[in-house]
Image (spheres, grey):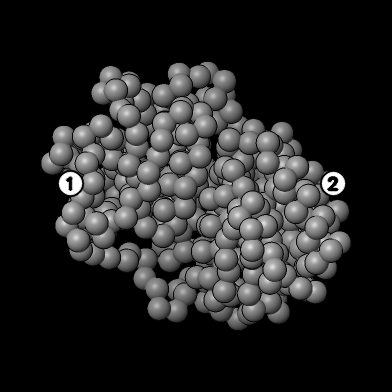
Amino acid sequence: MSLRNEIFEQADVLQNLLDSEWQGIQRIAEKIKNRNIKYIFFTARGTSDNAGLYAKYLLGINNHLPVALSAPSMFSIYQSAPRLEDALVLAFSQSGQSPDIVKVIEEGRRQGAMTLAITNATDSPLAEAADEVIDMRAGEEKAVAATKSYTAEMMVSAMISAALKNSQDLHSDLKKVPGFISQALEMDQVIQQAAEQFSDVKHSVIVGRGYNYATAFEWALKMEELTYIISKAYSSADFLHGPIAMVELGFPVFMIAPSGKVFQDLQLLAKKLKNEKQARLLVLSDREEILDFSSAPLKLPGNIPEWISPITSIVPAQLFCMALARLRGLDTENPRGLSKVTLTT
């Protein structure tokens, strides 16, 4: 099955990316610094948009660069683009074919901004439109649900961040990611058992915060496209500002809570959901004190630096969604109504 194979290819894909693209990314990072870029204007759709959400936290925290996520319809339908002269206009796209994403890059270049395409198709319209191109080197992705291209996009973002900071420590962290993913893939059987406990759900809330806010959104997307279960992503802070009111006995909540600066916030929420709301919790974490609240605890590898934890934490979520879809008798290779390349204007 393509989806399963592609999930299990991710450690090798990211190792290849590290080995083959590091020098090129260092060159691009120097060009960014020489251009005195004031902010990053990011454009994408679908899964790639969630990779951009990760980049927003990553480049903001590590590199102090503001990141704005674009509204492509400004460029395509409304034909009224914002000013981009001081921006790095950056696009993520697995296929590099969506016309609205290409238009954002074309307009950035027309305005004199530096443009960068990160894609799995270096001969695509997007790659042709950009000043610089980074090949995510994921190999052909046949399954409709993107998996290895998503982690590759995040890895490219992390490599750019490390190169911009010229940090050997950050680069050393990146070298550990393929090993962390290999460890996460060993959770396959435990994840299958967890999926069996949640095979009856009709809706779900998925909670993360900080770097893993993006993981919540990508997990929710995979839930909807593979299992057809209505799923909503929240930060733990936003969830407390109203949506927690819908939680009642047995309400399914999935949580991403690895070690890091937001862990305590997530732990307090998990305690509240379990003890006061009697929610049905599934928790991804490396910490026993929060896993104890989970009816189906999924233990992440330990000692993952928080800034790169989303590249690993999404992998168990991918496996969970695939297992849940199969338990529900669904086609994981070709979800209904979807195609591998979606062309939006």
Q: Residues within 10 Å of mark 1 (few under 14, many from 20)?
A: many
Q: Is residue 98 above or below residue 312?
A: below
Residue 247 location (% of width, % of height) = 72, 70
Q: On the picture, is 80 further left or further right than 315?
A: left
Nearest the viewer among 53 and 316 is 53
Rendered-image quadrant of the C terminus: bottom left
Q: Is residue 14 visible?
A: no
Q: Are marks 2 and 1 in contact (CB under 8 Å)?
A: no
Looking at the rendered structure, the secondary structure element under dot 1 is helix
| Callout 1 amino acid | Glu
Q: Is residue 279 left or right of residue 330?
A: right
What residue did someone put label 2 on?
289
Query: What's the residue at 37%, 44% (across, down)?
Result: 68
Residue placed under numbered mark 1 in the picture: 107
Q: Is residue 50 left or right of 181 when viewed as pictured?
A: left
User: What is the distance, in whole Å, between disc 2 and disc 1 at their CAs?
Assistant: 50 Å
Residue 6 or residue 259, whichever sits in front: 259
> Residue 292: where, in percent of width, then height?
86, 53
Q: Residues within 10 Å of mark 2 (few under 14, many from 20)?
A: few
At 62% from the left and 47% from the top, the residue drawn is 209
Residue 252 at what x, y percent from top left?
Answer: 71, 69
Q: Residue furthest front?
A: 241
Local SS, label 2: helix
Q: Which quarter of the picture shows residue 95? A: bottom left
Identify the residue shown where x is 84% and y is 46%: 288
